[in-house]
Image (tube, rainbow, N blue to C red):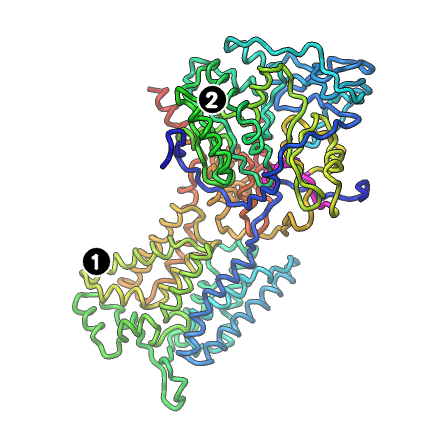
Amino acid sequence: MRSSEIIKPVKKVRGGVKVSHSKNTKDMPVKRLPAPETVTLPMSQHIGAPCVPTVKVGDTVKVGQPIGDSDKYVSAPIHASVSGKVTAIKEIRTAAGNVSQAVIIENDGEMTEFEGIEAPKVETREELIKAVRQSGLVGLGGAGFPTHVKLNFNPDSGVDTLIINAAECEPYITVDYRECIENSENIFDGVHWIKEMLGFKRCVLAVEDNKPEAIKLFEHIASTNDEKDEIKVMPLKSKYPQGAEKMMVLSATGRKVPPGKLPADVGCVVMNVASAAFIARYLKTGKPLVSRSMTVDGKAVMNPQNVRVPVGTEIEYIIQACGGYKEDPVKIITGGPMMGASIVDTRHPILKNNNAILVLGKKDISIKKETDCIRCGRCAAVCPMSLVPTLIERHARAKDITHLKLAGATVCMECGSCAYSCPAGRPLVQYMRNAKAVLREAQK
Amino acid sequence: MNTDNKLLTVSASPHRRTEDTTGGIMIDVVIALLPALVLSVVLFGFRSLLVVAVSVAACVILEYLSRKIMKRNNTLGDFSAVITGMLLAFNLPPSMPLWMVVIGDAVAIVVVKQFFGGIGQNFVNPALVGRIVLMTSFPTYTNNFTEPFAWRNPEVDAVTSATPLAQFAGNYSRQGVITAMNSSQMPTLSEMFFGIYGGCLGETCAAALILGGVYLCIRKVISPRIPLYYIGTVALIMLIAGRGNIQFVLYQLLSGGLMLGAIFMATDYTTSPIKTKGKIIFAVGCGVITSLIRIYGSLPEGVSFSIILMNILVPHIETLTTPKPFGALREKKQKGEAVK
C-alpha cells in the first residue's frame, strides 16, 4: 500500500528516451579531495551578469571571503574557495567556451576560514532572499541560474508549489542521489525553511524510481518529521528527460509552462535537491558556496567516484586525484552524457554548476556518421516539447523564419532526446541551436 | 599517462546515441518481407525468386551508378535500394519479362529517388511509380498472372487473368457481388488468406504479409496506425458498398495489393506524415481512394494510385497537423481570457 507521503505524478511526460543508467558510483560516498595548489575562479559561473573582482593581485584571501560581486540583479557573488594569495586576475576561457575574467588564488594550504562568516539571521522573506544571494548559490543541478532570483517571485502571483528535483535523469551522475542519502536532514531543513519563509502551500520531492533507497528514506523522514504532512515524495518513472524543469512542473502539478515563461508563471518553483540542502547548511553555518560534489566516471578514468572539491579546481587535477587515466580518453565531458559539454582542454576550472566529469573511453560513446534524414519521425516521437526536430532543421537551413516561429524552435530545451534516437546519426541538438540562432538573427 | 598531447573529441551533446541505424531499420524491413518471398517461391516457383533477385540487383547497381555519376556519396549501406527492388518485384506477376523489371527499377531508383536527392527526399514511393509505369506501358504483361503451383507441371497452360478483383470489377451491385463470389473461378477465403490464387508475386499471401507487419511493429520500425486505419477504412466502405456482406468485405481486404500496400508501402517513412494525426489522415485518405477506385474506377485495383495520390498530399497534411509546441496552446487560451 502507498503511504500518505507518496504521491503519483499528476501527468505523464510525453516522449523521452530510455537511456542506460550507468549509475556506477551510486554506492560511493562523496569523498573530499585535498585542495589543489591553485584555484581559478571565473567571474562568470552563472546565468546573468558576470561579477567584478573585489580583490587585487597580491591580496591575501581566506576561504569564504567574497572576491567578486556584481550590482546587477541576475548575478551571484563569488567567494574564495581556498585561503592564500591572489596571484593573477586575467581573462580565461571556461569549459563552456566563454571568455571570463578569473581570479587565480595560490593555496597556502591552511584553508583558513574568513572571519566574516556567521550564520545569517533570517526571519522574513526578504532576509532569506538576501541571504541566498550572499551565499553565492546558483542552481546546482547544472543550469547555474542564480537561486535568489528564482526565489524572488511576486508573493501575490499565486506561486504555491515547491518542487525539489532529485530526479537525476542523466546517466552516470549520482551526486544528487548521494546528497539524498548522506544529507537528507539538511534537505528537509532547507525545504521547511524555504516553505515557511516564502509561503509555499505544498512541497514535492521528486525522485526517479531507479533510486528506491532515496524514496524510502524520504518517505520515512516525511512520515516522522512532517507533522503538517505538506511534504510529499513523488517517485517518477525513470525516463530521460524526466528531470527537466518543465517536465517536473508537469509531473507535480499537471501545469504546462508556456514557451518563454518560467515555472513561477504557473505557480511553481523547481529547485535542485543539493541547492535545498545547501540553503539549510548556509543558514546554519553561514559558509558560502565554495566547494561542490561531483561524479567522476567513465571507462577512461582509473577510479570512478564521487568527490567534493573546491570551486575553481582544475579538471586535470580532479582526474589525477581519481587515479589518472586508465586508457586514452576519447571525450571528456562536464555534466551528463545527454546535455553535458565536451571540453577541449582539461585545464579548465570546474564551476559552481558542474555536477560531473565524465572521462569517456572508446566503449562509452558512440560517434555516428551523419547520413540523410529518412523522415522516420523518431525525433518527433521522443520530443518532450512536442516539436518536430527534422522539420525545424529544414526550416532553419532554408532560413524560413515564419515556419521556424510556428514550429516553436525556441521552445527546445536541448535535452538531446531527438539526436539520441536518430538512426541517421544527425546532430539534431546542434541543428536546433542553429535554428535558434537563425531566429535571433532575424529579430535583430 | 601523459595528457598533454592527446586530442579530445569535441561535439555537440548528446554524447550517447541509440544503436539503431538507418541500415538496421531497412534490414528489418527486408526481414519482414522474407515470409512473403518464401511463400511466393512455393506458390509460383523459382521464377518469382528470379524476378526479385533481378529487381534487387538492378536497384542496387542503378543506385550505385547514379550516385557515382551525380558525384554523391555511396549510400548502398542503407539497404533502401534493396527494399525498393523487393517491393517493385512483389508488385509484378511472376511471369514478368526481366528487361521490363529493370525498366521499372530504373524509373524507381533513378528518376523518382535519385533525381530528387536520394533517400528521404523523394516525394512519392519509388517502387509504386515503377509499378505504375510498367502497368501503363506493358499492361498485357502486368496482367498476365500465373496459377499457383503451376510450376509443378509445366505442360499445362497456366495463365489466368481472373484475379478476384477483376471479377468484382465493374459490377459492385448487390447481385453482381454475390454472383462474383459464387463464381467457380473465385478462390475461397482461406485460399485468399494464404495466397493460393493467381496474382502479383508478393501480393497474394496476406498471412505472410501480416506476419511481416507484426514483426515490424514489434521491432518498432513502423507504428500499426497506418495499416490499421488504411485497412479499416477500406473495410468500412466495402461494408457499406456490399450492404453488410462480411464475406465480401473479407474478399476485398485480402485481394489485390491492399495488405502489401498498407503494411509496406503506405508506411514508407519518406512519403508518409511524421506525426500521428497526419498518419491517420493519410491512411484514411488512402483507404477512401482505394475503395473509390475499386468501386467506380475503370481499373480493378487502386492501391498504388491511392498511396501515390496521398504521398503528394503529405506536405499539406503535415502543415495542417504539426502539433503545437509544449505549453503553447495554454498561452493562447490565456490570451483569449485576457481579451474578455
Residue B292: quarter of image = bottom left
Specify the quadrant that holds the C terminus of chain B: top left
Q: Is residue B86 left or right of residue B6?
A: left
Q: Tell me if residue A338 is in the magenta stretch.
A: yes
Image position, residue A25 (x, y; %) = 61, 40
Disc 1 residue crowd, few under 14, some 14–19, many 20+, Cα 10 Å: few
Q: Which residue is at the front of the view, B203 or B305?
A: B203
x 65%, y 62%: residue: B68
Judging by the rendered image, the residue that carries numbered circle 1 is B240
Residue B311: quarter of image = bottom left
Inter-mark Cα distance, 1 to 2: 55 Å
Image position, residue A304 (x, y; %) = 67, 41
Q: Which residue is at the front of the view, A415 or A294?
A: A294
**Residue type at the position of mark 2:** Ala
The chain to which mark 2 is attached is A
Which residue reaches farthest bottom? B155
x 83%, y 15%: residue: A58
Residue numbers of the magenta segment: A329-342
Does residue A90 appear in this view? Answer: yes
Judging by the rendered image, the residue that carries numbered circle 2 is A264
Q: Tell me if residue A83 is in the magenta stretch.
A: no
Image position, residue A431 (x, y; %) = 59, 40
